[in-house]
Image (cartoon, helix red, strand yellow):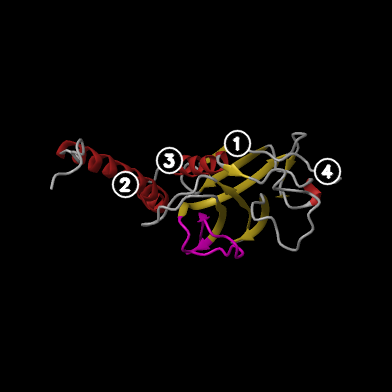
Amino acid sequence: MRGIAGDKGFTLMEVVVAVTIMGLVMATLGTAFSQLSNGAHRLEESGDDNLALGEAIRWMGRDLEGLYVDQAPLFSPGDSTDEPDPYRFTLARETVGGEEVSVLRFTTLNHLPFGESSLGGIAEVVYFITEEKGELRLRRSDRLFFHDPFEPASGHPVMMTRVTAFQVVCLDAEGQEQETWDSDSDTYGRATPVAVKVSLSREGASGRSAEALFPLRSLRKEAVDG
């Protein structure tokens, strides 16, 4: 019995090319995950403060670039519900190790798959500080399923060690700096900021610090009832 005419299957060269491409894709994903989960350890060994600061700032910029917020008609300021908006943008402040630091939470399209998972989608990202062994560490949480409230934990990847300052401010539509924000609150007009400024410092002989301003591409303007 003969096969269908013209159905020659894959050639050996096509199979080799496909396997090579798949290998490159997997290597790229593996490199990205390694940079995030193990980057802090490598930077600690190198002692390069500038590199550590740049790596952390780069990741924050990447996440903010993919910011996701609901827009009308998916979002309505007149909705009355006890449940918070899952795609809210919030900026809070807390004291960790005697230092006042920022906690930045938002949702982004720039989810980084972990382990063997290849799932994509909108992820909740939280940048926060923990204290361990007498030092402050900047960590990043990335969750695709975030119905449960966020709980800081030592299992989240470390972005930078030996942190001395982590301050985030939001710029509103008038260009005024705000140290806190909640896009789910009438206080902020149910809007997102127009830009985010991040200041990060690291302990070291050189006392390095870095600051960056990130204009937000995805914005929700102040909502008005009615």
Measuring 45% from the left and 39% from the top, which residue is drawn there?
50
**Which callout, 3 or 1, points to the residue nearer the camera?**
1
Magenta-colored span: 131-157
Quadrant position of the C terminus in the picture: top right
* Residue 149 is covered by the magenta coloring: yes
* Kind of element beneath mark 3: helix
Relative image position of residue 105 (x, y in whole percent): 61, 52
Q: What x and y, as percent, mark residue 10?
A: 20, 40
Q: What numbered label is drawn on residue 26?
A: 2
Cα–Cα gap, marks 3 and 1? 19 Å
Q: Residue at x 45, y 49 (%)?
A: 112
Residue 138 visible (yes or no)? no
Q: Tell me the SS state at disc 1.
A: strand
**As shown in the figure, which amino acid type bears the numbered disc 2?**
Met
Nearest the eye: 92 or 206? 92
User: Are discs 3 and 4 less than 8 Å apart at CB?
Assistant: no
- Find residue 214 and name its label: 1
